Each structure stands twice: as C-alpha cells, then as structure tokens.
Image: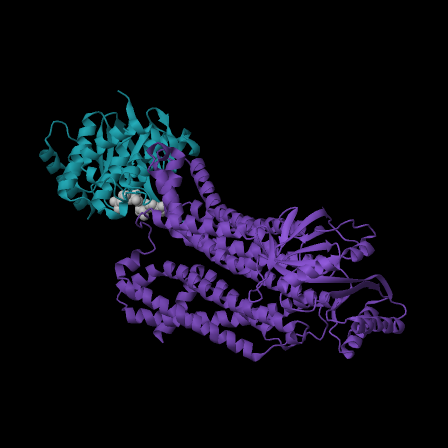
Amino acid sequence: MFFVKLAFQNLRKNKRAYLPFFISMIFLVALNTVAQLIITNPDMAKLPGGASAQMMFGLGGNIIIIFSVIFAIYTNSFLLKQRQREFGLYNVLGMGKRELYRLVFWENVFSYLMSIIAGLITGFVFGKLSFLILRKLLGAQSAFGFHVAGSVYLLVTVMFLIIYILLLLIDILRIRRTNPIELLHSDRSGEKEPKSRWLITIIGLLTLGTGYYWAVTIKTPLDAISLFFVAIVLVIIGTYCLFIAGSVTLLKFLKHRPNFYYKANHFISVSNMIYRMKQNAAGLASICILSTMVLVTMATTVSLYIGRADTVTSLYPYDLSIQVNEPGTTTSLKAVDKAIADAQDKYPNVKITEKNRVSVYEVPFTKKAQGYQTLDPNKSYNADTINMQFITTQTYERLAKDKANISGHQVIAYPVRGSLPGRHFQINGTDLVVQRTIHSLPNFKQQRTPIDMILLVMPNQASIDKILKAAYPGQAASQAPTVKTFFDFKAPNHKTRIAFKDTIKKDLAKTHTTAFLESKDEYEETSNYITGGFLFLGIIFGIAFTLATALIIYYKQVSEGLDDKKRFEILQKVGMDRKAIKKVIHSQIMTVFFFPIIMAIIHLVFAFSFIKNLLLVFGLVNGDLILWTTIATVAIFVIIYFIVYQLTAKAYYKIVERQS
Amino acid sequence: MTALLEVNNLKKIYQSRRSGVAIEALSDIQLEVEAGEYVAIMGESGSGKSTLLNILATLDKPTSGQVMLDGRDLKTVSEKEAAAFRRQHLGFVFQDFNLLDTFSVKDNILLPLVLSRMALKEMLPLLDQVAKSLGIQALLEKFPYELSGGQQQRVAVARAIITKPELLLADEPTGALDSHTSDQLLEVFQQINQQGQTIVMVTHSSIAASRAKRVLFIKDGLVFHQLYRGEMTNQQFLEMIAETMTALLSKED
Ligand SMILES: Nc1ncnc2c1ncn2[C@@H]1O[C@H](COP(=O)(O)OP(=O)(O)OP(=O)(O)O)[C@@H](O)[C@H]1O
Ligand SMILES: [Mg+2]
C-alpha cells in the first residue's frame, strides 16, 4: 500500500515532467482508437472499391501502431531522464532497487489507467468527428454510418497494455543498470565531449547522396515504386547519420581551427552546439524525417484530391469508350451499335456527341538503342516498355481530315508519352522514317498512361501487317485490330446519365461479346473514394506526425532550457553581457529549429520528381498543379512549424532567463 | 594614495519572495581597500561574506550604500555595462567554481579573453603563464567533469587572474584544496600580489588569512574587527588571527 501511495504522490508532484508524457500517451491512444474505428467500420467494405480502401486504411493503421511504439519509447526516455535523480535519491536514502521497481510498477499502472481512459474518450470524440469529415471527402451516402465496435476499445486497451509493459521493462532495466551515484547525477550536465566520427559521417553522405541520386534519376513510375522505397530507406539512414555524426564532426572540425574558434561569437556557439547536437541529434533527425513524411503525404494526397477531375479526363478522354478486340469483329460491332441505339431510344433526351470509331493495332515493345523490339512475353512491363499504336492512312485522313502523304518506309509519329529515338528508327529490324511529327490527333483523344506510348500512322495495311508478323512470328493470321468506339454524351441530370450508361453496359453483357466498356462516370466515382480516402489518411498522418514533431520540439526546448540556464548564468558572471547572450541563445535556437525543416524541404525537393511520377501512375499529369500544391503544403507546414517554434521558444526563454 | 575600493554604509536585505520574511545579510559595511592590498575577510557561515563579494563584483545590487571602484560609483554602472565592466576590471573566483561543462579547461580559462576579443597569439602566452603558476598544465585538454574539486578550483582561479584584473575577488579559493595545493594557490596569490595585484579573499582558513596583509572579521552584517599584519611573520600573524577567532567565538556565548 505504501508504494501505491508513494507512486500516486509522485505522479502528482512531478506534474511538470509527467504532463507532456500523459499528453503524448493520450494522443497515441486516441490516434489508434480513431484509426481502428475507421478500419473496422463495416460500412467501409460496402463502398465501391471499399475493399482496397479498407486495405489501405489497414496499412495506415499498422504504420500508426509502429509509430506509437517508437514514440512511446521516446517520450518515456525523456521522462526517465528527468526522474533518474529522484530514483537515485530514493536509492541513497535506503530504498533498494526492488522497492524502486515496485514504485515504478505502480506509477506505470496509474499512468496506464489514466491515459487509456482519457485516450479512449478522446478517441471516441475524434473518431466521430473524423467520420463526418471522411464521409464528406468520400462523397458517400448517409448509409455510411458511424459504428462503434467494442472490440476496438479492447484492442486498443490490450495494445497499450503491451506498450506499457514494454516501458516498464525499459524503466526497470535502466534502474538496474545504474548505481546510485550515477542515478543522482544523471540529470546533471557534464557529459563527455562527443567524438567526431568520420566513418559514420561518410556513410551518411554516401547513403544520402545515393538516395537523392536514385530519387532524381528514376524516370518511370513503374520502376520508381520499388526503387524509391530503397531510396527512402537510404535517405532516412543518411539523415540520422549526418545529424548524429556529421554535425558533431563538422563542429569539431571548426573547433580545431583556432583562428575561427577563438572568436567571441564562434567560441560559445560552437562548443554549445557540440553538446546540443550530441543530446539532440536523434531528436532533430526524427523531426526532419517526420516533417518530410508530413510534407510528402500531404503534397501527394492533396494533389490527388484536387487533381482528381484532371486525372479522370486524362485517363478517360471520352465519357464512354467500348473496345472490341476479336477476329471477325463485325457481329460484335453490330451488338455495340445496337446497345447504343437502344439506350438512345430509351433515353431520347440524352445527346451523344463526338462519336467515333477507330481501328487500331496495339503492340508493346521494348526500347532499344536504334528502335524497338518485341517485348519478351515472360517479362513484365518496366521503364523500357513502350506501347505502340498503329493506324492506317485511311483512318488518319478520316479523323484528321488531312492528307497523309506518306509512302514506303514513311510514318507520321504522334508521341503521346515519351519520344522517338530519332527520325530514323527500326521496329524489329524494319526501317522506318518519320515524315512528320504531330502532337494531337483530332477526334481521337489519347489516354495518358504511366508507360510510354507512341502512335504511328502507317502508309497502308500491308506495312502494318509486316510489323505485326515480325512481332508475333508463327501466327498465321494477321493480328486483329482493336476497334474503339467512343463518344461523349449529355444528359439532363446525373441520374439519367448513370442510367444511360448502365443500360448500354447491361445490354452488352447480354450479347456475350468481348466488348469492353470503360465509363468515365464509373471511374469518377471510384476515384472519389480513392482520392478522398487517401486525403483522409494524409490528414490523419499529417496531424499525427505534426503533433509528434511539436511534442519532440517541446521536449527538446524544456530539457535544453534547463541545461542551458546554468551555462548562460555562468557566462553572464564571467562577463558576457545579456545582449550578447540573447544573441547566442537566439541563433542557437534558430539553428536547432530550422535545420531539420530546411533538411526536410531539401528532401522534398529531391523527392519531387518521384512524387510527380507516382501521381502519374494515378493518372495525374498536371505538373503545375502538383508543384503548386507542394509549394502550398510547404508554406502551410512552415507556418505551423513556426508557430510551434514560437510557443516552445517562449517556454525555453522563460526557463533560461528566469532570474535566480 | 586614494583607495581603489571604497565601501560606505553598505546594506543588503534579502526579501524572501515566498514567505515575505526579510533577511538582513549586510547591515552597515564600511571598507576601504587600497591598490596593491591583499585583504582577507573572515566570518562564520551565513555572516554575509559571499553577499558582500557579490555586490563588489556587480553580480548583486545593494539595498543601500555606496561602492566606489577606482573612483567610479558602481551604481552608475548600468546593467548593460556590468558584464563588460566585470570583464575589464574584475576577476572573480566563485565559491562553487562555475566552470562551463561544455568547455575544456583551456577554453574555460581563455573564456574572458575571448569575450574581450583578444587575438589568439596574445592569449596563449598568458595561458601558459597562469597554468604553470597554478600547476595545471597537464589538465588543459581535460573537461571539468574529469577534474577533482580542487583541480576545478584552480582552474577557476586561473580564469579569474588571466585577465590581470584591477581587483581580484576570491570566495573561499582554498575551500576545496588540501593543504599542499592550498599552499600552492596561496603562493600564487602572494606572487601576483607582489606584482601589484589587489586581492580581496573570503576564507574560513586562518592559515589562508595569515598570508594576507589585513584581515577583516564580519559578524552580524558589520565589519566587526580588523587585524593588520604590519611587520609580523606569517606565523605570528596566524597566531594572532587564531586568537581573535577564539575570542570572537567565545564572546558570543
Ligand atoms: N538569494 C538569497 N535570498 C535570500 N537570502 C539569502 C540569499 N543569499 C544569501 N542569503 C542569506 O544571506 C545571509 C548571508 O549569506 P552569504 O552567502 O553571504 O553567507 P556567507 O558568509 O558567504 O556564508 P558561507 O561561509 O557559508 O559561504 C545568509 O543568512 C543567507 O541565508
Ligand atoms: Mg559564502
């Protein structure tokens, strides 16, 4: 009973040390509750594309769990550092380590109960709130309700029980490893001067450099996804190495330059910064990484959400497109025409425009130095894959209402995405000459794809057949063309639009043809769920990471303030005036604060081309939109960061400047 | 010869913020120190010695009274100038050393010179000199946390005397030293005093005090008694100080 009481007293007495810890733990509990409430919502699966959205949220939930464990350990270590002196005192005053364990055990029990209760309540409130936001973002119907499963609370409770047990073990291990004198002095500064570590610095430079290089040189998104993951890991390793070892190494390098070092303003900042970096490098690197994550997630998800209309048009140039791809297409085409005509009869007030039908041959190739070669059927698409579309001069002339005027080896090239190797190139050994290049083809708008695509107008059917034969050797009959029928349509209202599209779709399904229908409206709907879901995840992550960043900054300020206070007092006594001290404090704070965010922005700059490539996979081709969204994201984040800085810097100044 | 330091009717009252109780640390101090003098201040714990020294060092402000250093009233030294004033005119050995843990011993000693923007070339010979006289050459590259209390104290002394201040104020500079190193330190003080350095030293040790030219006894916030060495040897002076101390203590009962 004694320990229970003492533990409870401790919590109350150490409010200043415990409060940030509680806030962090409550925040983590609430965050996980919200995440789990969303993941387990049964209505989610009912949405179109809901399964994939649920998987996405599940992934996000797991990331949040990992993040929670790491952040809980970090917060706890900060608390432990502040409390070690107290433990030392108890130890010296005759409390054995066993008794200390018991004390820590009860403290953790109380701490757990308080944070789990407060966290679950907060989580419930914010869960409800975020559901309303999510529903709005998804544009989902009211059927999408807020469900509270008891299992969520149980899961979170158990999860944090495990986390607290982990923290308790860490506490016990720490107490066990130290002797009372060390415990007593562990919060006193006077640590060893850190050593410069060239090896780690060089490793940091190399990993960061390689990561950056990869991030920038990746050209196609399909390559990007796997490689970029490696690049991210490299950049994270590089950041930690450089912050931890590189900063100290650089400062020590400066320190060993006497003519630089023994100057009034350098002298104090350099020696102070060495210690600051030693104690805070990991925290600063974490701030940098977290900030980068916030920036990348927000820039990506907001771009996707804002640009979703763009995406839809670039992926679906027409409202409806029906592809038929089989030998003897005439019957199928008749079925297509009939389906459209029937739908028209049923909905006479729907107006069809821009209707057209094009026969086109599509073949994937692999890029070679001089031209293209048939894609190895056993290989998957990669950065060197290119899709070629071949049409005849007749088709071209009908669409473009323009004379083709080509013959022999001549072609008209339309590079939809990517470019040709030159005016002369080969396809499987067949020489071709680009007679002219065009940049659009009237009445045949092209879909933007993540892989390269080139449309070639060939002089006649024979020249197309020749290429097809070389591309598919051993196939007797010449390849059948894909016949694309596409059109836009206007309907008096959304309901008619959907009904019109559905009628055609159902009709075609009944005819058992291989007709493949793509509807812009259908895509738009799923796209809303996906981009809305992503944005929601982005916001949750953004808030979580930003709060984590703010908390780390707060911890740093308070712990450093206490250390620095004594130093600045001494400096003042020895004859440094207040103004100069203020200047040193200010420049130190600025460096420590803005170093991570500047690094984060540099990371973002290098990640930008990847972000663009990644968004291309989702069909977002509007580069300007991505750029401006990213800039706006950075601006907003810097403002929030600056506000956090202002608030915590005030706390720091208060501690440092408090007159004794 | 005019006095380098002149203290008139100095009073210091500490107002406890929490309880509102006022503690009179110094009630009415009269004191004159001439250039080149070596004065020791003695008194029991809590008698206000550190308080007096802190006021002389412009680290604290008196409640009333006047302190003149080299003809300048310390009241006219603004808060802004105080730091530069300390750096240029005063050296201070703190009771609790006040070394910076982020600096090596060498950098700790050089700190006041660097703050005065002295060129590195000029600093190093001065450093050599003080380090040798205090026997801390071997410690220069170490950090304060690696030093014993006595070593730290010598470093603090080195930092105070390296600027060759007009007035050296030392608060129990031998407090953490054994008799041997304490002798060594007192030797240094005597040496620099012979070279013209004015010293005011607070001490509990009669031996340390016996090296000074004059000893002041503080009690109840007043300068209670003074002893002059005159022509006495260290030993004679020491005996006299010891006698006075016993007398002072017995009077109390
Ligand atoms: N900041 C302060 N606030 C309130 N009272 C103080 C403060 N500093 C000192 N005092 C009080 O003033 C009196 C004189 O203190 P001072 O430190 O000058 O003593 P001292 O003679 O140096 O003692 P010692 O020999 O132990 O160092 C003491 O009673 C002390 O409690
Ligand atoms: Mg004292």
User: Which of the chains is cyan?
Assistant: B
Residue A369 locus on image (x, y percent): 57, 50
Q: Quadrant of residue A617?
A: bottom right
In the image, ligand 1 is in what quadrant?
top left
Instruction: Check the picture and name the quadrant holding the N terminus of chain B.
Output: top left
Q: Residue at x 41, y 29 (%)?
A: B76
Tell me, yes or no, if residue A497 can be seen here.
yes
Residue A629 locus on image (x, y percent): 64, 52
In this rendering, would A301 be left or right of A158?
A: right
In this rendering, would A653 be left or right of A465?
A: left
Indicate the colouring scheme. by chain
User: Which of the chains is purple?
Assistant: A
Above or below, A278 against B69 in this view is below
Residue B25 locus on image (x, y percent): 32, 43
Q: Residue at x 36, y 76 (%)?
A: A1
Say which of A271 and A660 sits in front. A271
Above or below, B39 against A134 in this view is above
Q: Quadrant of residue A178?
A: bottom left
Say which of A390 and A609 sits in front. A390
